[in-house]
Amino acid sequence: MNESKSRDFNCEWAIVGYKGDPLMEEMTKSAQNAGVHIAFSDFAMPIETMLEKHYASFFTQFSLKHLSRSFKMYPKPLLFFSIREIVMQYQYVWILDNDLILGESINFKRLYSNLQCGMQPYDPPLVSQLVNNDNGNINYHYLNSNAWRSSDVEIISSVFVEIQTPIFNTLFFEWFLDTIISPIIAPLLIMGSDHGVDNILCGAAKHYTQMNKNLSKLNHKTQKSNKMISLYSNHASISPCAIHTKQSFTHLNLKSSVSNMSAEERQQDEWYKHKLIVVISDLFPQFWVFGQSPESDPRKRKRDIKTNAQLRWRCEKHLKSSRANI
């Protein structure tokens, strides 16, 4: 969407959803009420169409009905593929669950400013998320808004974020799909879950920054390596993930698929989740982060991350004179 001229930053925004989804209209109205002008809306490819189109060879061995469990749940990372072609023209993609409500207090201008400039002198995060306003996250207390009420920090590096409401840099988003999600499509579909993906997200982002840093050293002449190193060279000492501590969402926690399960199906569901975690941790042990450990809490590491107000001011001044795509 193009932000109106009354706003400081010139951004293009777009809303993407599934055809017939009533949330498309709700999100459009919510954005307009926040002062954001929509450039266009688009429809993502249905999940079944996308899977059969891009993974036809896989479906010669298994049919969709055998891969989907009785309560018909498609893991969220697989849905990422259906928006890939649309979002790659943008700098960021913000992916929201359909049971989330963005608070009216969200300041889109400040969110984008923090995203681009809040981590100076470090580079913008590759993945970031808002905090939970209803404070219902019992597993990761630092992802709740009340954990930051007495803090003046607006954005902070974190070694763990959830895939519930991630804001991805689209270059990393594309790499993550090709390198991490593609090899685990089969277990994700068979298990009908995405448990464990959160745990490797920031570790994969850290690897991505180091990989691009090494690539640029090998070949400074290619346009692609120069582009990547200019964006992601400065994350050597901190995680390239971040939490927006003063911007929040409300989680309705509908979990309709779980509520319709029998006791036996719930027990089976927990078994599948556990097995998927084992599969992902075994495949990507170097990326694995246990978000519930005390060491993962960014509140304990605030003093180790020194940001620079003067560099932030210069960054924001540059933003006001440039045009960006979200």
Image (tube, rainbow, N blue to C red):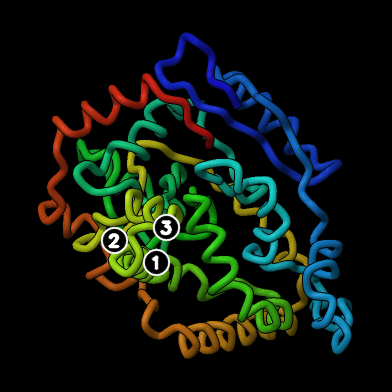
Q: Quadrant of the N terminus?
A: top right
Query: Relative to 182, is 243 on the left or the right?
Result: left
Q: Position of residue 71 (x, y in %)?
A: 80, 71
Mark 2 or mark 3: whose residue is earlier in sequence: 3
Q: Residue at x 66, y 33 (%)?
A: 27
Viewer-nearest of discs 3 and 1: 3
Mark 2 or mark 1: whose residue is earlier in sequence: 1
In the rendered view, tell whether residue 280 sits above or below residue 219.
below
Q: Which residue is mark 2?
A: 239
- In front of the other: 305 or 274: 305
- In front of the other: 291 or 38: 38
Q: Which amino acid is tagged 2?
A: Ser
Binning the other alpha carbons within 10 Å of mark 1 as few (below 14), some (14 to 19) or many (20 upward) gives some
Q: Position of residue 86 (x, y in %)?
A: 68, 46
Q: Which residue is mark 3?
A: 222
Q: Which amino acid is tagged 1?
A: Tyr
Secondary element type, mark 1:
helix
Q: Label 2 to label 1, Cα distance in Å?
A: 11 Å
Q: Which residue is mark 1?
A: 208
- In front of the other: 295 or 112: 112
Q: Which amino acid is tagged 3?
A: Thr
Secondary element type, mark 2:
loop
Q: Residue at x 73, y 43 (%)?
A: 17
Occupied quadrant, residue 199: bottom left
- In front of the other: 5 or 188: 5
Q: Label 3 to label 1, Cα distance in Å?
A: 18 Å
Q: Label 2 to label 3, Cα distance in Å?
A: 26 Å
Q: Residue at x 39, y 77 (%)?
A: 287
